[in-house]
Amino acid sequence: MRVGTAYRDITPDRPLALQGQMHIRIAKYTRDPLTVNAIVFEEGGKRVALISTDVCVLPNHLAEEIKRAVSEVSGIPVQDIIPAATHTHVGPCTTTRLFGDIDPTWREHLIKSTADAVKSAIDDLEDAELFTGAGWLDHMG
């Protein structure tokens, strides 16, 4: 098995409406960067990409656009590309309901940055072994 990872900064370059505030709220500053993180697994000539994006939600239409863009630059079939949202409430809007509209320029930046991250993860592929484990942490939950 080979595994590669990469990330890209998707922090907006200007104030945008934040999602998940239950009212329209425009970001005034950036405390921490927002990122899209990609990990690609390769085994027997097949590749799978898992993508974590610092947004509240990834609506189906946006997830499908991301998958198509990633597939185009990586050759990974869309059914083997799995985008997900971290569910942060301090990221830009990705839907048009309740919280304002997605900024079209940032939307394109998100899609391109995601595709770039997956392509870089492929370029980073190296031999790896996959392990699992479990543990318990007292006083949590």
Image (cartoon, rainbow, N blue to C red):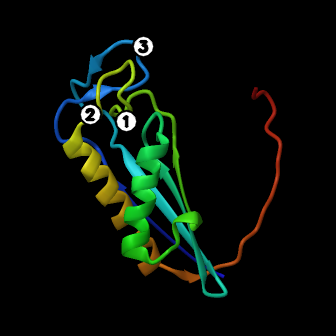
Where 126 sits versus 18, above or below? below
The residue wearing badge 3 is 22
The residue located at (41%, 63%) in the rendering is 68
Where 49 sits versus 139, above or below? below
**Secondary structure category for the residue under label 3:** loop
The residue located at (25%, 52%) in the rendering is 109
Indicate the amino acid at tag 3.
Answer: Met
Q: Nearer the viewer, residue 59 or 141?
A: 59
Distance of mark 3 from mark 1, alpha carbons? Answer: 14 Å
Indicate the amino acid at tag 1.
Answer: Thr
**Secondary structure category for the residue under label 2:** loop
Residue contact at pointers 2 and 1, CB within 8 angstroms: no
Q: As drawn, is 24 to the left or to the right of 14? A: right
Quadrant, the N terminus? bottom right
Q: As drawn, is 4 to the left or to the right of 108? A: right
The residue located at (33%, 26%) in the rendering is 18
Residue 16: percent from the left, percent from the top? 23, 30
Distance of mark 2 from mark 3, alpha carbons? Answer: 20 Å
The residue located at (78%, 27%) in the rendering is 139
Q: Nearer the viewer, residue 100 or 119?
A: 100
The residue wearing badge 2 is 30
The residue wearing badge 1 is 94
Distance of mark 2 from mark 1, alpha carbons? Answer: 18 Å
Could you classify mark 3 by the number of other residues whose Cα lies within 10 Å: few (under 14), some (14-19), or many (20 or more)? few
Residue 77: percent from the left, percent from the top? 52, 72
